[in-house]
Image (spheres, grey):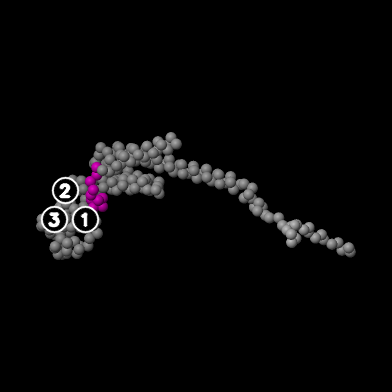
Amino acid sequence: MVRDLDAYRDLKTGMRELQAFDDGIAGIPADVAHRIADGENPVRVWRDHRGLKAVALARKAGISPAYLSEIETGKKEGTFRTMAALARHLEISLDDLAPLADDQDAVSVRRAGREAALKAEIAGIRATIASGAFDSGAVRGAVKRLKADMDALVADGAEPIWARDLASALEQIVQLVDQAESDIVETARSAQERLEEIMSFKVFSPGAHRRSAAAPRDADGAATPLPSRQVAGE
């Protein structure tokens, strides 16, 4: 009971720290950030992310598909009015469609993407822990990915103040998962031993259910003696 209470407190502490971290991250999608940081056109990336076909977006923005194609391929720069219309229909700010000025901008966007990936993993852990069907393997996998994303973020030159707290929270969650898996194994082992003990009862033995032949009965229900064998010559 004490161990379970400690585990519960560890989980609550870890989730509070993850929640505090989660609330402080910008909402740019990780896949968008990575593609833009790698040099792809922001209009094309955001259109793909929204699941819009070029013809549909062009129609919404009031421009021709050919003009949109030239913007996405960098052959032409869109006018302010055109870019504002594209941003509005992509449900983003006009700044999100601005091309990267230099490598430093690319690093910043890539970093934002990694932070978005961290946020997504945190949301996944929270949902898994909160669900009735707790999956320790899923939590362990998400924690592993979170650590990898955090290491990559630090490798990019960022060392946020929350990194140590996040690492501590993840460690607490891993310990809890280890304990939960250990308890499951122990419970299963105890159940197996108890089942084997029950199955050893005499009632489960192969000959326990053999029934003896019933004696014949007369019309009144009284048992009648079995006829004796006659000896030859009597």
Residue 117, given in percent of the width and then of the height, sits at: 28, 48
Query: Which segment is the magenta one?
Result: 24-35
The kind of residue on which mark 3 rests is Ala
Residue appearing at x 43%, y 40% in the figure: 179
The kind of residue on which mark 1 rests is Trp
The kind of residue on which mark 2 rests is Asp
Relative depth, front residue between 18 and 49:
18
For marks 1 and 3 on the same chain, the one whose residue lies earlier in the sequence: 1
Tell me, for residue 102, which label it has, or none.
Answer: 2
Q: Find disc 1 in the rendering and name its residue.
A: 46
For marks 3 and 2 on the same chain, the one whose residue lies earlier in the sequence: 3
Residue at the far right in the pictured view? 233
Q: Is residue 13 visible?
A: yes
Residue 191, given in percent of the width and then of the height, sits at: 52, 45
Relative depth, front residue between 194 and 56:
194
Q: Find disc 3 in the rendering and name its residue.
A: 84
